[in-house]
Image (cartoon, helix red, strand yellow):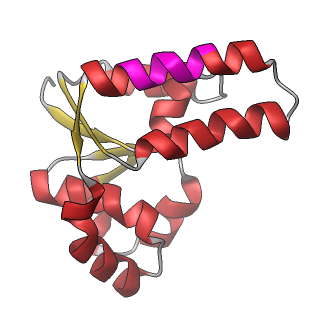
Amino acid sequence: MKGKVVLDSSAIVALFFQEDVSERVEEVVEKYSEYYTVSQAYSEVANAAWKRVRIYGEDEGLSKQALEKAVEFMDRVCRVEDSKILLNSAFEIALKNGITVYDALFIALAMKLNEKLVTTDRKLYDRIKKTELVKFVKCV
């Protein structure tokens, strides 16, 4: 199925930090050849690493190492779209669909590219599954 796909922060976290859905995300992501994300993913992935250490007591060194690998992946493999460029459409998507602008940024990029967004965010998927946005989102 080689082609383009948008990865949100939850999908990137699942690729580099051990999660219940990590294997499934890897299987889905391997089907594509071009990866896209938005610039805010850097801070969201870093926040996930922080949370693992501060809230869940995971090893700081391991979390830092996983974060470095995730950042390297975004830098070298992903095409990173500036969040600012997508803000207006993300704002409209968020208001219309009752989701956060953070989540809407990834959907706005998927819509711009006319490609799928891969996410592990079940709450996001549940909010948009009965809207026209569902055709742009694959929840793993």
Q: Is residue 66 magenta?
A: yes
What quarter of the picture does the N terminus occupy? top left
Residue 127 image point, x, y percent: 49, 71
Name the side, left or right, on which 123 lies relative to 72. right
- Residue that appears at 54% across and 51% down: 121
- Comparing 19 with 88, the one in front is 88
In the image, residue 30 sits, relative to residue 117, either above or below, namely above
In the image, residue 119 sits, relative to residue 130, either above or below, namely above
Q: Quadrant of residue 79?
A: top left
- Residue that appears at 53% across and 38% down: 45
In the image, residue 119 sits, relative to residue 67, either above or below, namely below
Residue 17 image point, x, y percent: 61, 23
- Comparing 65 with 93, the one in front is 65
Residue 88 image point, x, y percent: 23, 76
Residue 85 image point, x, y percent: 19, 62
- Can residue 119 be seen at all in this image of the molecule? no
In the image, farthest residue toward the bottom? 96
Q: Quadrant of residue 32?
A: top left
Q: Is residue 92 magenta?
A: no
Name the side, left or right, on which 111 lies relative to 69. left
Which secondary structure class fits the magenta region best? helix
- Residue that appears at 50% across and 62% down: 124
Q: Total number of numbered labels?
A: 0
- Residue that appears at 12% across and 29% down: 3
- Can residue 126 be seen at all in this image of the molecule? yes
Q: Which residues are magenta?
A: 65-72
Name the side, left or right, on which 106 lies relative to 111. right
